[in-house]
Amino acid sequence: MPNKKKTKKEAAAQKKSNALLLPLYLFTIIFVFAPLVYMIILSFLQKAEIWGVKNVFTLENYRRILEPLYLGTFTESLKLAFLSTAAIILIGYPYGYFMARMSERWKKRMMMLLMIPFWTSALIRLNGWIIVFRSNGVLDKLLMGLHLTDKPLKLLYSYEAVLVGMIYALLPFMILSVYSSAEKMDWSLVEAARDLGAGRVKAFVSVTLKMTLPGLLSGVILTFIPSMGLFFIADLLGGNKVVLVGNVIQEQLTKGRNLPFAAALSVVLMVLTSLIIAFYRRVAHTKELEGMFV
Amino acid sequence: MKNRKWIQKMLTLALAGTMLAGCGSTDNAANAEGEANKLEGTEFNLFTWDGMFPQEVLDGFEEKTGVKINYSNFDYDEDMLAKLEETKGGDYDFVIADDYILEMIKEENLYQALDTSKIKNWGNINPLYQGQFYDPEDEFTVPYGAGIPLIVYDPALVDIEIKGYGDLWDPSLEDNVALIANYRVIDGITLKTMGESFNTNDLDVIKAAGEKLKELAPNVRVINDNNTQDFLITGEVGAAFLYTSQVYEALSARDDLEVVYPEEGLGFGIMAGFIPSDAPNADAAYAFIDYLLEPEISAKCFEYIGYYCTTKAAEDYISEEMKPFLVVPDTVTEGESIQNISDEAEQLHSEIWNEFKNACD
Amino acid sequence: MKIKSKFPWIYIGIITVLTYVPIVLTVVYSFNESKITSVWEGFSLKWYEQLFQDSDLAEALRNSLILAFCSCLMAVLIGTTGALGMRSRKTKTSDVIAYLSLLPLMIPEIILGMVYMAAFSFLQLPFGMLTLVIAHTTFCVPYVFTTVRARLAGMDKSVEEAARDLGASDFRVFWDITLPAIMPAILSGVLLSFAMSFDDVVISIFVTGPTVNTLPIKIYTRMKTGVTPEINALATVLLAVTTGIILLSSLVGRRNKNK
């Protein structure tokens, strides 16, 4: 509390803001915080014989994560997340940037075009990619028609296919974040920099990139975090051969019936993502995720 | 909660009352009529995978009894177990699931014993499929479909003659095999190639199987539980290890495919239904079981799901073309079932499976 | 500043076309005779016939619409009031709550589903629409909350203060100035929440009860058993409807502007 004496007006405003905050506080505490605590507690308990947990404290679940198999899964997931995020930046940044420089009418149209795929089930869209990539599928036929290859390529069920799926599923998040950041930008600054003799590249780095950095970073977060857990992409396009943390968690919850171990894996995943967000706040000097779709 | 318990008590009392009345009645037909009337307007919560019944069978039951069916689905057997644990055997009236999970349902006391006197078609069940490991006394389950996972291959895409599981390791099959994604089954066939049981608790043996399984990795094109037969039908792979219904789908789509009954020994799996301990409308479940066991209805169901027919009386109603797939010799149950094993062994299975998958990509 | 060179247009064009490839194929293959999704066997309308007779899917669609509507409404109420409340006050607690409210987006869905199932059963809530709405609200709130908060942060307070100094009531200030200013943010939050809720399988499958099926659950479980062409037909119909609504609303918007 500031040491200043509060005026009446301020006290009233405080009361009002308290009332406004109440629903969010209550909801978050009951339905987000409490389940979260429950999950953390679970991660320190022992698995029961058939289902559920025994109330015995153990660190075994965390020790097990340190086994090469699971550590390997974490590094593998991180690697894929880095790769897909990098590719998404390369594709999505120019897209969002160009979009922000369009006329108002085209901005609206592009927004619509971006949103429509969002409204189709993700599973159905993935199925569309399977039609493209499968043996003797659309792409194979196209390539063979152009005589670029003479036999069906085995494109599906590979690491590359999973990468394409990830990029496809998460690209819109990056585009929209960069767009909303670039849209607020003052373009006259870029012109000023150019007028002052800065080259294209220099103007871009010192002005444009700097000003769109928050959007870019929030795009990174919105794509990096989900790409660690999207297990169904690895299942459908990777033919189950690419194992991500999300897949292991899913398997432990179902076939393994091991709630505590799944909880421990989730806690580690959450700590990792929280570290990334903390890093973002430090770099972007901001507390909010910039831009999400404003 | 108090309220709910009170209602439950009332319901139990009412139920006991009708049961007594039922016992007293000698006229079976009239009794059945009365049952149907009593069910009119109630809801029946059916819980199993999607696609387990043809729509006309469900519609027929609704029409006959006036009961509204709520057909909800789970993804894995374990999801079902979790849901029943959380609702303490409530919410659902009839559940169909795999054999091994039924053993856990039994241990967790989430079932209610069947009163077979209420099921007039009880005798229609093929006794071959009763007395299974999960329910040796036929206390709480009704079998609904059985199967043996088999190898199917496309001779045009495969250079060797496949005779058993071991042939899947043949180097000529590089990047040419599709597998179902059930690790106990796939680890299991690896154990079989080593002459071991699916259900061994010997950790060293399982570890050795893990090493052997890794050698299969170069041959594996895709691991998938759903529509695995499509990879074979479309020529994505030359050989596949499939569930029974998938074997049936594959063979009916392409008659040039070959089925292999692996020489190392067969696996055997069965699905069965039960009434959860605290089912809100158990009466409807009884009526539904009875309905499913009617020969004609049963025949329609098995023709639709493509698993081996577990209702003896239905065999005559299955069409001639489908009979070879659905009505199989009695030796089928000689195959080994996958059963629950020790926690350490189960965990090791999951680990060797993940190592195998890592080796695949 | 307008775009002068052609390159950006070509670039955006290519990427946009690529994102539509799977959707176009889904539409095309919904007219496919074959039951196997990936093999073309000839033109047929039979999947549409089946779709329109499928009462299960119709009910699931209705449930999903109700669910998405209710959770968006809840998310707007909770998210917007929360963002407004935090605007005039920044404390450690509000920081923590803001961070916590984002967590549902960071935890893998499957564990969230499992944890909610346990939590709801602990709270003795009956599994069904109520539990679905609560669970969906948890992941819809962050979208609305963050968008509104970002918009408020960029807003000039002086207009509101001026209005207040001129004697406008709090409600009037909110209604006439603040609300119109944050409306685009609320709307985009809602659009996204709606899409997310309408697409959620994993959490729903855990927290739903015996009588409520949602559309994504049905789609998912059907895809597992392989009746996909009907699902493609359904996707096509939904796509046509949403595109229709979007086009219509933009037409209406334009006409209003012209008046």
Image (tube, rainbow, N blue to C red):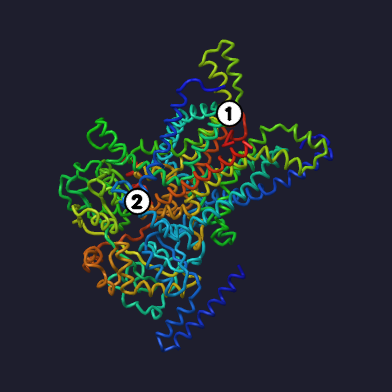
Screen quadrant of the C terminus of chain B: top left
Q: Residue at x 70, y 42 (%)?
A: C85
Q: Position of residue A234 (x, y in %)?
A: 39, 42
In the displayed structure image, the side of residue B144 where residue B150 appears, left or right: left
- C256 or C100: nearer the eye? C256
Q: Please state which of the two labelled residues, at mark 1 or mark 2, is closer to the viewer.
A: 1
Q: Position of residue C44 (x, y in %)?
A: 33, 51
Amino acid marked by disc 2: His
Say which quarter of the image contains residue B286: bottom left
Q: Position of residue B14 (x, y in %)?
A: 53, 80
Report the chain holding disc 1: A
Secondary element at image label 1: helix
Q: Measure the C-alpha gap from mark 1 to mark 2.
A: 53 Å
In the displayed structure image, the side of residue B358 where residue B266 appears, left or right: left
Report the chain holding disc 2: B
Q: Is residue B283 above or below residue A28?
A: below
User: Residue B349 shows which numbered tag?
Assistant: 2
- C103 or A85: nearer the eye? A85
- A25 or B192: nearer the eye? A25
Q: Residue furthest top?
A: A197
Would residue A50 be seen by someone viewing this image from the given angle?
no
User: Residue A183 shows which numbered tag?
Assistant: 1
Screen quadrant of the N terminus of chain B: bottom right
Q: Is residue C27 above or below residue B116?
A: above
Amino acid marked by disc 1: Glu
Q: Position of residue A2 (x, y in %)?
A: 78, 35
User: Residue B85 shows which numbered tag?
Assistant: none
